[in-house]
């Protein structure tokens, strides 16, 4: 369809238009922070509906601002725009036209939902205050939200609260999860590098062998989850890589490992990091090696704020029937989401919309057969409209 036609007509585009927009984004996915075409398309549409658009906020991020009335209240709603570096295996007409790139997480749908809401809100203007629509690149790289924040987004576009949504395959359409407190996990990459003294495999007495140290560390690290954390403290600690040596008869100088640490609170994360540090120091003394420990946080835990979660729940309740507005996730999720950085800066809530069940719409995100369910566009837009009208009443 012709994008330009969208803002030459005064009538609000219908849902079919946004289904079409979603499919266009799906067919032309952009990766990471490199989302110039998606961002340009979003910006042009928002401008056409009367939004003041600020481009290049933290790279290709953009913020569309709409003011109405005289209230000083401000609201931020965020959608992510980036795809994944994988090849799509679906055969339908709107399948990715770019090998090695695919909207396998539904960010095409999140963008279309927020655009559909944007068009209607601009038409009805049933709110009092300032609405900031945040379109963010590079969620999958866990860098886009931070880049926008570091570029002064919340100073330039103050938000009393921020909200975002994600589709959730395996949950029926028409069901949503609005959960207070810890909702998505933190992600940390830990690297341990052991330096000993290498030598001939026949003369271990002349060496300081890092290999047994590596083995001992692997065992000791297993005790963090099983012996240090309480049963109600959620964590996943996975050793994803161990490296040492080259051939059978050389004792290596060095050995290393890479670990993924995920938790759902800052406190648990701190506890794990403290224990890792103690274990490493103990091994240095016991084995006479030098051990470097580096811990890089990729995203903090996502913790929804109580008050804003309740506001969202009240706003959405007219849209969902009995038993369709869940207050806890059906299953604990240890995936990460970089909206967590925004929730560290401003109060808010991140909620889930069921993408459907069955082989197709129940297919997991990040799978080559996944597709966002277009039925969610109308429902999702309705959620953002209700929130805007309620929060900026
Ligand atoms: Zn994803
Ligand atoms: Zn996602």
Image (cartoon, rainbow, N blue to C red):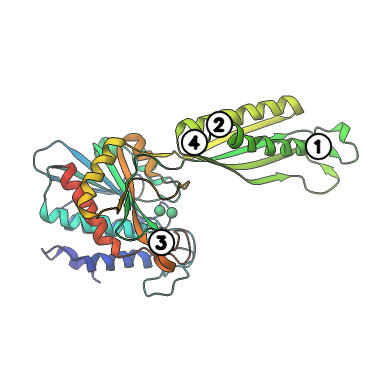
- Of labels 3 and 2, earlier in sequence is 3
| Quadrant of the image containing the N terminus | bottom left
- Of labels 3 and 1, earlier in sequence is 3
Write the residue at 29% across / 61% down. 376
Q: Secondary structure at mark 2?
A: helix
- Of labels 4 and 1, earlier in sequence is 1
Rendered location of residue 295, percent (x, y): 55, 35
Write the residue at 77% across / 37% down. 212
Closer to the camera, 231 or 164?
A: 231
Q: Which residue carries the number 1 mark?
A: 198
- Of labels 4 and 3, earlier in sequence is 3
Tell me if mark 3 has few (under 14), some (14-19) or many (20+) residues whose alpha carbon lies within 10 angstroms of its own: many
Q: Which residue carries the number 3 mark?
A: 103
Residue 253 in sight here = no
Answer whether labels 1 and 2 touch (C-beta < 8 Å).
no
Q: Which residue carries the number 4 mark?
A: 232
Q: Is residue 11 left or right of residue 295?
A: left
Write the residue at 58% across / 34% down. 294
Tell me if mark 2 has few (under 14), some (14-19) or many (20+) residues whose alpha carbon lies within 10 angstroms of its own: some
Closer to the camera, 217 or 21?
A: 217
Rendered location of residue 233, percent (x, y): 50, 35
Q: Quadrant of residue 155?
A: top left
CA gap, disc 1 to disc 2? 29 Å
Q: Is residue 142 left or right of residue 124?
A: right
Q: Which residue carries the number 2 mark?
A: 273
């Amino acid at each position: 369809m012709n994008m330009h036609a969208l803002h030459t007509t005064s009538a609000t585009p219908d849902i079919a238009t946004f289904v079409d927009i979603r499919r266009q984004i799906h067919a032309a996915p952009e990766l990471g922070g490199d989302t110039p075409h998606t961002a340009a398309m979003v910006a042009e549409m928002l401008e056409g509906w009367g939004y003041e658009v600020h481009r290049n906020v933290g790279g290709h991020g953009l913020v569309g601002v709409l003011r109405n009335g005289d209230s000083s209240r401000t609201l931020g709603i965020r959608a992510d725009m980036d795809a994944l570096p994988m090849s799509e295996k679906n055969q339908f007409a709107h399948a990715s036209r770019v090998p090695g790139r695919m909207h396998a997480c539904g960010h095409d749908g999140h963008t279309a939902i927020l655009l559909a809401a944007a068009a209607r809100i601009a038409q009805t203007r049933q709110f009092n205050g300032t609405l900031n629509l945040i379109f963010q690149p590079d969620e999958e790289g866990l860098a886009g939200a931070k880049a926008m924040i570091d570029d002064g987004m919340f100073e330039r576009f103050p938000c009393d609260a921020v909200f975002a949504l994600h589709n959730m395959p395996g949950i029926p359409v028409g069901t949503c999860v609005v959960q207070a407190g810890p909702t998505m996990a933190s992600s940390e990459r830990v690297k341990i590098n052991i330096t000993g003294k290498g030598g001939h495999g026949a003369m271990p007495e002349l060496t300081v062998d890092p290999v047994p140290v590596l083995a001992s560390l692997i065992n000791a690290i297993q005790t963090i989850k099983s012996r240090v954390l309480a049963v109600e403290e959620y964590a996943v600690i996975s050793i994803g890589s161990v490296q040492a040596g080259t051939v059978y008869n050389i004792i290596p100088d060095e050995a290393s490992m890479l670990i993924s640490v995920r938790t759902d609170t800052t406190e648990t994360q701190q506890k794990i990091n403290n224990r890792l540090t103690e274990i490493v120091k103990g091994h240095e003394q016991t084995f006479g090696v030098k051990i470097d420990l580096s811990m890089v946080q990729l995203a903090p835990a996502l913790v929804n704020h109580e008050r804003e979660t309740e506001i969202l729940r009240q706003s959405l309740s007219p849209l969902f029937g009995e038993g369709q507005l869940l207050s806890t996730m059906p299953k604990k999720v240890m995936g990460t989401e970089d909206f967590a950085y925004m929730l560290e800066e401003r109060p808010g809530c991140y909620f889930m919309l069921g993408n459907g069940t069955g082989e197709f719409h129940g297919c997991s995100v990040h799978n080559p057969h996944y597709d966002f369910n277009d039925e969610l566009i109308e429902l999702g837009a309705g959620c953002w409209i209700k929130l805007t009208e309620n929060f900026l009443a």
